[in-house]
Amino acid sequence: MGTGAGSGRGQLLLRSLLLLLLAGTPAPRPAGGQLRYAVPEELEHGAFVANLGEDLGLDVSTLSARRFRIVSRVGAGQHLEVNLENGILFVNERIDREEVCEAGGTCLLHLQLLVENPLELYRVEVEVLDINDHAPTFPWQEYVLEVAESAVLGARFPLESAQDPDVGTNSVHTYRLSPNGFFSLEVQTRSDASKFAELVLERALDREQQRTHRVLLTALDSGVPERSGTAHILVMVLDANDNVPAFDQPSYGVSLPEDAPAGTLVIQLNATDLDEGPNGEIEYSFSGHAPPRVRELFHIEPRSGQVLLKGPLDYERASVHELYVQAKDRGPSAVAVHCRVLVHLLDVNDNAPEVTLTSVSTPVLEDAPPGTVIAVISVLDRDSGDNGRVSCEVGPDVPFELRSSFRNYYTLVTTQALDREVVPEYNVSITARDMGSPARLTRSTLTVPVSDVNDNAPRFLQPSYSVYVMENNAPGASICSVSALDPDCQQNAYLSYSIAEGHIHGMPVGTYVSINSDSGHMYALRSLDYEQIRSFQIQVQAQDAGFPPLSANVTVHIFVLDQNDNAPVIVSPMPRNGSVATELVPRSAGPGYLVGTVSALLQATDFTLFSLAPDTGELRTLRSFLEQDATRQRLVVQVRDGGQPALSATVSLLLSVVETMPQTLSDFSEFSLPPEASSSSPVTLYLLVSLGSISFTFLLAILILTAIRCRREHRSHQADGCSPPRCHCCPGSSPSSDGLKTSNLTVQPPAGTTAATCHDVPGGGPPGYCYKVCLGPESAQSDFMFLKPCSPPRNNEKDPGKQPQLGQHLQRVPITSLALPRVFQVKQPNMDWLPPSTQRPALKRYQIWHCGSRGRG
C-alpha cells in the first residue's frame, strides 16, 4: 500500500495552494495573439482562474447584455465558466489532468470566448498544471520472483516497474529496497526517461538454508510532498535453471496505420533460451504493468510471440502505444525477461471535419447592410497534418460569404442587400473540406430566415374602380368591394381600408357610403336617386399596420343607373281644379293648325279631325272645321315612357271651337316644372294642396268684399230717399212703360284684350236702371267695377246730352292684390271664370245687375 494513497482532500487542497503560492497568481500570457493562463488541476468548484473582463478590456456591466459566453465543442466538458457579473473565469467542475489529457506533455484547454453587439471572438488557452495527486503504484502488491540457487553473484533480475500517471517531477523518480543480506537494487533509465529497477544478487543463495527471501520495494516520486508506492517481493530459491531467455533487442519499434483492421500482425517477437527441454521452451505475455488500454488493443500469442491487433486504433486519441512484453521459459525457476515494443500509429484521413454553427443574429432584417454578421462557424478536424487542415466555403447563389477571423473559425456575413419579398428564407450550405487524400468533407445547412420590414406600400388590384348601382337601392346594401395587396408579411401586410374626407353635393361623403376597414366591402348608406345624383367619385385609402405605416389611394367611380320609377307628369295642358283641360280652337283653323303639344292621343271625338306627332307631341288639325263638326271636341292624351316596365299618365283635353280667338290664357302654357317637381310625387301633391288653399282664400275674399260693398250701397240708397220697396234689382222683370226702354252700358276691357259683346237687357217695372258689366278674359288683372247709385233724369228731361255719363259713376276696385301667387313660375288660371255651358263662344263674361230706384222730385 502506497504511503500517500490515504491522504485526504484537505491535504490535496493544501498542496494546490502551496503550488499556487510557489507559481504566483496566474497572469495572462500572450500566445500567438491570444491569452494564456495556467491553473492547477483538482481545484474545487468556483476556484479563481483569471479576470477576463479586465484582461480583455471589456465593460463588466455589459457582459450579460452582450451574451458573453464560452463556445465549446459539442460533447466537450465545460470545465471552466465565466461569471457575467464580474467577468471572472472560474473552475466549473473538477479538472483531472490525467483524464483530460491522456498523453503526457503539456495539457491545454482551448477556450473560444464570444461576445455580441458587436460580435467579437477571443481565444484563450488554459494550461492545466500537474499536481502530485497520484502515488506510484505497482501492478501487484506482492510479486513472486523465482531465483535459481545456481545464480551467480551479480545476476540481475528485472522487477516490475511502478506506474505514476503524473508527469515531470511528479512521476516515478527512484526505487528503494528494504535492507537485506542477499540483494541490492539498481535503478535504470530507459530511453524515454522512465525508471525501472533491477534486483542484483550480492550473495550466493542456498536453497537448503533459506528457501525464500522477502524484501520491500518502494517507488518514490519527486513531487511536493513526496509520494510513494510499495510492493512486496517474495524471492523463492529454485533449483538450477541457469539460462534465461533473451530477446533479440531490448526494445522494438513498429509503425501501424490507424485504420488497420483487427487481426493485423503488429510484430513478431523472438526470444531464445540456451536450455533444452522445458527450460528452453519460451512463453510470451504482457508484463504485469501493461495498461488495460493496451490489453484491449493488442494480443500476444503465448507460443509464437506474435503481437496481433485486437481493437480499433485511433491516432487522435493516442499516437503511440507502449507494450511491455515478457518472455519466460517453462522450466523450474524460470526467470522472465522483458522488452518494450513501441507502436507508432500513422495518421490516416479517417475523420471528416466537424462544423459547429453558432447562430448569432437570426432572423436577419431585410434592410441589414452588407457585412452584417449572421453566425459564427467553427470547424474542427481531429486528424493531423494536411489531414487536419480544413477549408470552408458556402454554396453559390446566396448573398453570404465566409470570413476567417481565427484559424478554423469563420463568420458568415451578408454581401448584398436582402429582399424578403423575393427570397423569404435562405438555406445556406456550408462545406468544410480537409486537405487529406482522399479529401473528406462535411456539409451543414444553416437556415437564415429574413425578417420583414415595412418597405412596400399597399397596391390595389385595379388602377381605378367603376361601380354601377341601380337607384332605389336598399340602405346598407353592399355595392362593391375593393382589394389591395401588400407583399410584406405579418402586421406590415395587415391592411385597413378607409374613405378619404370629401363632400358630395355639399354633404360629407361619409353620409353616402361606408367601407369595412378589414374586408374592403363598400356599402351604400342611403337610397340613391338617379334624378338627383347620377354619378360621384370617392377616394379609398388602404393603409398597412407597419411602422411607419404606408398607404395607397384608389378612385372609385360610382354611377347611378336609372330605374323606371317615375311616371310621366303632364305639365301642358294642365287640368284645372280637377276638371278637364280646355283649349280654344278657331273654327277658321285650317289643316296643320297647331292646337298644342301633347304626347299621345288615345281617344278623340273625331279622329279624322286631329293628328298627333309621336316624337314632338304636337297636336294639329288634319282638315278645316265643317259646320257639322261639334263645337266641343274631347281628346284623351296618354304619355308613356320607354322604361321597363313602362309607366304612363293620361289627361283629358276639351277643345272648344270658337269663331274668333280671344287672347286668353291657354291650358297649353309653355312652361316646365323644375326637375325636382316633376320627379317628386310629394312635391306635386303639396303644390296642388297649396293652389287649392290659395284659390279658396281668394274666392272667400271676393265674397266678403262683395257683401261689404252691397251693404254700403244699400245704406247709400237709404240716404238718398230711395225706399227699399222701390229699389230692387230686376234682372228678370218685364219691361215697364215708365222706365227707360233700353239702357246700355259697355265697359271697355283693359288695353290689349278682346272686348266681350254685351247685349241689351230691357228694363221694366218701376223706374230704374239696369246695368251690366263685362270683364275681359284676363281675370287675374281685371278690375271689378261697381256703379254708384245716381238720380235718373226725370221724364221731362229728354236731352240725352245733359244726362250724366254712367261711366263716370263706375268705381274701379282693383283686385290685383288678391291675385293668385305664382308657384314654380306657373300661372294657374282661376276656374271660376270659365264660360257658362250655355254659351258656345268660350267668352269669360260675368254680368252684374244693378237696379237703382228713381228719386222723386
Image: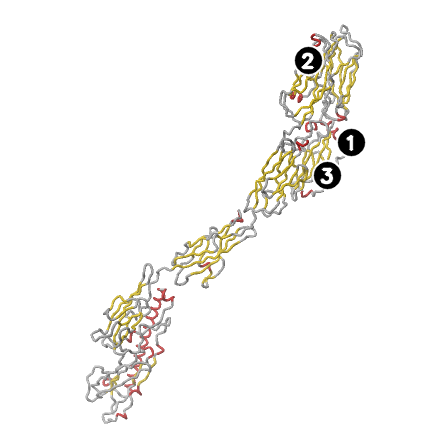
Secondary-structure class at tag 1 = helix
Q: Is residue 761 visible?
A: yes
Type of the residue with mark 1: Leu
Residue drawn at x 74%, y 7% as measured from the top left: 239
The reply to whether dot 2 and dot 3 touch (C-beta < 8 Å) is no
Q: Nearer the viewer, mark 2 or mark 3?
A: 2
Residue 607 x, y percent position in the rendering: 24, 69
Residue with the mark numbered 3: 33
The reply to whether dot 3 and dot 1 touch (C-beta < 8 Å) is no
Secondary-structure class at tag 3 = loop
Quadrant for the C terminus in the image: bottom left
Residue 747 to residue 302: above or below: below
Furthest residue toward top = 208
How far is the residue under mark 2 from the one under mark 1? 51 Å
Q: Earlier in the sequence, mark 2 or mark 1?
A: 1
Residue with the mark numbered 2: 283
Q: Earlier in the sequence, mark 3 or mark 1?
A: 1
Label 2 environment density (alpha carbons within 10 Å; few <14, some 14–19, many ≥20): some
How far is the residue under mark 2 from the one under mark 3? 56 Å
How far is the residue under mark 3 from the one under mark 1? 27 Å
What's the mark number on residue 22? 1
Q: Quadrant of residue 63?
A: top right
Residue 450 x, y percent position in the rendering: 57, 44
Residue 356 x, y percent position in the rendering: 62, 36
Secondary-structure class at tag 2 = strand
Type of the residue with mark 2: Glu
